[in-house]
Image (cartoon, helix red, strand yellow):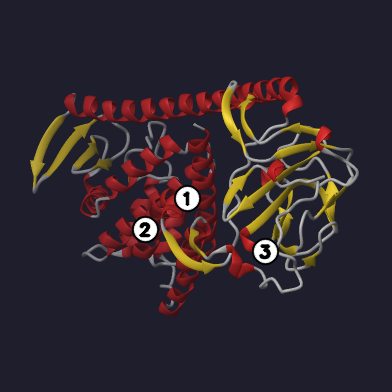
Amino acid sequence: MTSFLIYLIQSSLVFSCLYLLYIIVGSRVTFHQINRFLLLLIPVVALLAPLSYLLTFETSSTIIQIPQFNEFVANSETVLIDTIEETGTQTYNFITIVFSVYLLGSLLMFARMIHSIWLLFQLKKQSEVTISNDLQFIHTNHISTFSFFNWIFISKHIQPTESIIIAHEKAHVKLKHSIDVLLTEVYIVLFWFNPLVYIYRKSLKSIHEYQADNWVLNGNIKTSNYLQVLLQNIEKETAHANNLYSYFNQPVIKKRIDMITKKPTAKVYKLTYSVFIMSSVSLCLAFTKPNTVEKLLPNTVPQLTKEFVLDPPTLFPVQGKSKKDISSTYGKRRNPLKKGKKMMHKGIDIKAPIGTPVIATADGVIAKAADQNKWGNLVIIEHSDGYQTWYAHLQKFNVTKNQSVKKGDVIGYVGNTGASLGAHLHYEVHYKETQVNPLNFIKK
C-alpha cells in the first residue's frame, strides 16, 4: 500500500515536470501533430519512469557489503516494543486513511466516466440514426454537435450553412481523437488528485481542435467562411458539455481563431523539442540504480605491512569497561521486533556513557568510517589473517578511511546513532567473512 502511494506521488511529479515543460516549449507553436504526440507521451513516461529502477546497468565498484542491521538492545525490550507498536500503528492508520481517500476519489471519477458513456448510449438510443461511409450520424435535440469515435451527434438546431461543423467533426473521427480523450479520462481516474491533469486535458483537446481546423481548411473551405462559422458559434450554449465528447463549440474558440490566423512556426524551432526528449530520458534515469559488481574487501584497503603482528582482536573494545558491562551476548536471542522470535545476535552489546572512548582491538587498517543507516556511525577495521572488527552506533569518529591503527588506539566514541535506543557499542568480529563470537578472543 505504501509503495503504491509512493509510486503515485513519483509518477505525478514526473507528469507535472514534463507537462510544465511542454507548456514552455510547445504550447504556442503550430506543430500540432508533434504536440499531440508529446502530450500523449507525457502520461506514458510518467507511468513508466518510477518503474525504471527495474532496469539495471552494471558498474564496477570496490565496496564493503553492509548487511541490514537487525540487532537490538537486550535491556530495552519493553521500551522498544511500546515505541515500535505505537509508531507502527500511527503510521498504518495514516497510510490507510490516505489510501482510502485516494480509492474513494478514483471510484467517483470512474463512476463519472461510466455515467458519461452511458448517457451517450442513451442519447443514441433515443435518436434517429443514419449511416454513411462507416460513420453513424445521430440526429438529436442536443444543443451542440459533437463526435465520439465513429458517432457524430448532429444537433437538429444546426443550420444548412453550417455543414462546416459536420466536416469538423468528421476530422475528429478520422484523426481518432476519441481514443486520446478516453485514455486521458482513464489516466485522470488514477491521478485525479493532481490538479495539472485537468489543465492537461484542456491542452490535449485544444490540440485536437487545431488539428481538426487544419484538416477542414486543407479542403475546399475558405478560411474567411470557416472563421465566420466559428464566430457564430461563440455565443452558443455549452451547458451540457461533457469531457468525453469532442465539441465543435469549445471555450477555446478564441485560441483556435488565433492559431488559424497565425503564421506557421519556423521549422528550425523543432530543435527545441530536444529539450523535452532529454528531460524525459533524464527523469527515467533518475529512478534507475546501477547493478554494482562488487569486488572483495581486501582490494579496498592497503595491504597490511609486516609491522602488524599477526594476532586476532583480543582487547575489550570499550576503554575502562569489562565483560560485566555486556548487555547482550553473541548467539540466538528473542527479538522484540519479531514478536519474541529467536534470532541470531551476531555480536555483543556493551553499555557505556556517550563519549566513552572505543579502541581498536588489534592492529589494522580502517576499511570504513561512515554513517550506515541503522548501524549508525560504523567503523570497520581490516586486520591480518582474514579478521575484521565492526564498531557500530558511535557518537563520532577518531579515524578516517585507509588510516593505519595500532591495538589500543582510540577509533571513536560510544554513541546512540542508528537503530539504537540507548548509549552502547555493538561490536562484531568477522573471520573470513563470517561472524564469530567476540568473547572467544577477548582476553581482558
- Considering only order in the chain, which callout, 3 or 2, is on the residue closer to the N terminus? 2
Report how far apart the C-alphas of labels 1 and 2 lie in the structure: 23 Å
Residue 215 at x, y percent in the picture: 26, 61
Q: Which residue is mark 1?
A: 50
Check disc 2 and report the residue beneath it: 36
Judging by the rendered image, the residue that carries numbered circle 3 is 384
Q: Is residue 38 left or right of residue 156?
A: right
In the image, which is nearer the foreground, mark 2 or mark 3? 3
How busy is the neighbourhood of tag 3: few (under 14 within 10 Å), some, or many (20 plus)?
many
Secondary structure beneath dot 3 equals helix
Going 79% across and 55% down the picture, which residue do you hit? 360
Residue in the picture at 38% in, 48% down = 232
Q: Give whichever of 322, 209 is nearer the camera.
A: 322
**Quadrant holding the C terminus:** top right
Decide if residue 126 is on the left or right side of residue 424.
left
Kind of residue at badge 3: Ser
| Camera-nearest label, 3 or 1 | 3
